[in-house]
Image (cartoon, rainbow, N blue to C red):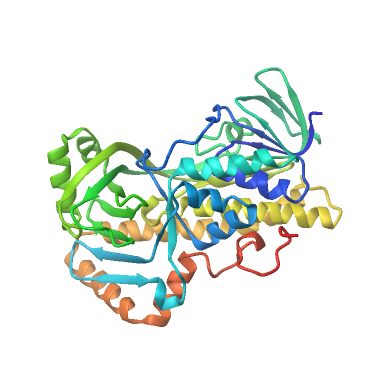
Amino acid sequence: MNHFDTIVVGGGSVGLTTACALGMQGFTVAVVEPRLAPESPVAAGHNPRVFAITRASRQIFMVLGAWDDMVAGGAYPFRDMRVWDAGGGGEIHFDCADIGEPCLGHTIEPQVIQAALLRRAQALDAITLFCPAQLTAIDVTQGPVTATLDDGSVLFAELVVGTDGKQSPLRERLGIRTQIHDYRQASLVARVLTEHDHQATAWQRFLPGGPLAFLPTVDGWCSIVWTLPVETAQQQLVADKPAFHAALGEAFDFRLGRITGSEFREMFPLQRLHAEHYVGEHVALAGDAAHVIHPLAGQGINLGLLDAAALAEVVQTARQQRKQIGSLHVLRRYERWRRGDNQLMMTAMDGFNRLFGNSQPALRRVRNLGLSLLDVAMPAKNLLVRHAMGLAGDLPSLARPATHSPYIE
């Protein structure tokens, strides 16, 4: 009863996406998650954080059968995005109508995503949830993988997938090293209410200390992500509401008028992390266990979901070719596929962070001119936004809009 094709360690959004993608293809999956899943999801509007979900991520959720639950839970489509530089007049506006799409993406609170995926996982006979449970030992030196849980249970599988976050106990147990860079910044997140409507628009202003984003949500509020030097973020975290509202409104250039309300302030120190290897014999890492990037473009969750979809495709192809799904030769295809894309996104985000955080007058003029020129260069701008939305590039089949999918009967 404890023999599976795959063990997924970590029952967050990426872990459950991996499990569902594999389970729908008939692989037996054990999901090991230490936190007790709530009997009913926390309602939308009770979390300061939201994820900006791309069209590719939405497609993954649709094929897995979780999207309707997410819409019911409060997924909110945004149609426009406005980005401008506090150091000058440069500004760029992205409009979904310019590329013939109904929206640029959706904002969704994390617990809504996880609850919908959990319901799908519970509905699939191929998936067994071990929750709450913790991994206490693992042996990958000889197939199959042997995993011991804190209640003494022993699980066996051909492949173990680590999706247990940036601190990844599994990655540490397996001795996979990481490269870490401390940005000396922190993200302050909160729910805020503004004097004027958010206009179904995602707003981002680049400031010397880091970007400030206002993401629209279903209830008329915005979720903010304010990147600041760590000490400044700590000050804003504990500031009283009038002082916080005044500072936030000024930092946002009062684009939506005054800040009239706020809830649930939290702070997250920022680091870049990249695992030196995504795979080993019988082992694969995905999501934050493999890579953590700067949040200025909100791409972290979307990269993790693409990891899950790519890994599921590689494993499915291996089975069709009668290969061992946990062999290093098979898993290296997944690493080659995803590591380059993730590294490229990391480099781009670091570059933007340095570029817009630099206050040199000559550089300010150049970047503002660049924003203004890109705003009127429609072919280049539309290509950029299509890539950011997950409508272009080397996408896994699960993420590609298509009339035929191996996941749909």
Is 409 placed left or right of 50 in the picture? Answer: right
Name the outermost residue toward the right.
Answer: 322
Is 231 placed left or right of 374 in the picture? Answer: left
Residue 287 drawn at (x, y percent): 55, 46
Out of 253 and 409, give the one closest to the viewer: 409
| Residue in view at x 30 percent, y 36 percent | 264
Against 39, residue 46 (above or below) is below
Against 405, residue 216 (above or below) is above
Count of number-bearing discs: 0
Out of 194 and 361, give the one closest to the viewer: 194
Against 145, residue 342 (above or below) is below
Residue 295 drawn at (x, y percent): 39, 51
| Residue in view at x 61 percent, y 40 percent | 119
Q: Quadrant of the N terminus?
A: top right
Asked whether residue 15 is in view, the answer is no
Residue 281 drawn at (x, y percent): 74, 42
Q: In which image quadrant can residue 298 be found?
A: bottom left
Residue 156 drawn at (x, y percent): 78, 31
